[in-house]
Amino acid sequence: MFRVGILTVSDKGYRGEREDTTHLAIREALEGGPFEVAAYEIVPDEPPLIKKVIRLWADREGLDLILTNGGTGLAPRDKTPEATRELLDKEVPGLAELMRLKGLAKTPMAALSRGLAGVRG
């Protein structure tokens, strides 16, 4: 089993002004695979908090996979890719390209995602 962390980055979700349903969709996508969701958290669009959780889960908790969602758009507070990039040992751009390609089947807005993928440790 791969131990997975799901990190939602959302100011409104963190403040309780919006229900986080994205983590449910991620959990559903992982069903049937060799995955166990071992951690889940919502943080505001603040790079220090994003990095803190990723470091904790990767370095201390030893999670095998960390999936972030939110904060990948073009708004001024969307900083998830920048925060994540600082923590990666290597980027794997092909994975992010595949995610955008799959997203395009549902919405043309997927092309505006700045999501990235990579390896830490």
Image: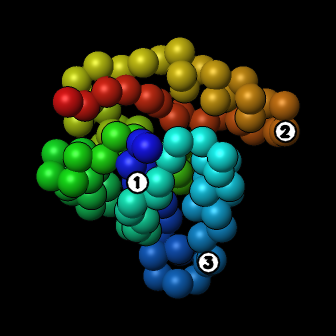
Quarter of the image that includes the C terminus = top left
Q: Which colour scheme is used?
A: rainbow
- In this orientation, does residue 57 appear? yes
- In this orientation, does residue 68 appear? no
Q: Mark 2 points at which residue?
A: 106
In the shown orientation, is residue 4 left or right of residue 110? Answer: left
Residue at 49 percent across and 64 percent down: it is 10
Tell me the distance, in whole angstroms, between the alpha carbons under discs 2 and 1.
25 Å
Q: What element carries label 1?
A: strand
Q: Of the residues under marks 3 and 1, which one precedes in the sequence?
A: 1
User: Depth check: 32 or 84 in front?
Assistant: 32
Q: Is residue 112 above or below residue 10?
A: above
User: Measured from the top left, where is residue 94 in percent x and y?
Assistant: 53, 15
Q: Of the residues under marks 2 and 3, which one precedes in the sequence?
A: 3
Picture quadrant of residue 97: top right
- Mark seen at residue 5: 1
Tell me the distance, in whole angstroms, between the alpha carbons under discs 3 and 1.
21 Å
Q: Which amino acid does label 1 sit on?
A: Gly
Tell me the distance, in whole angstroms, between the alpha carbons under discs 2 and 3.
22 Å
Residue at 54 percent across and 26 percent down: it is 96
Q: What element carries label 2?
A: loop
Q: Name the residue under label 3.
A: 18
Which residue is outermost to the top? Answer: 94
Q: What residue type is labelled 2?
A: Lys
Residue at 31 percent across and 55 percent down: it is 50
Residue at 46 percent across and 57 percent down: it is 37
Label 3 Cα neighbours within 10 Å, binned few <14 / some 14-19 / many ≥20: few
Q: Of the residues under marks 2 and 1, which one precedes in the sequence?
A: 1
Q: Is mark 3 on a helix, strand or loop?
A: loop
User: Depth check: 75 or 112 in front?
Assistant: 112
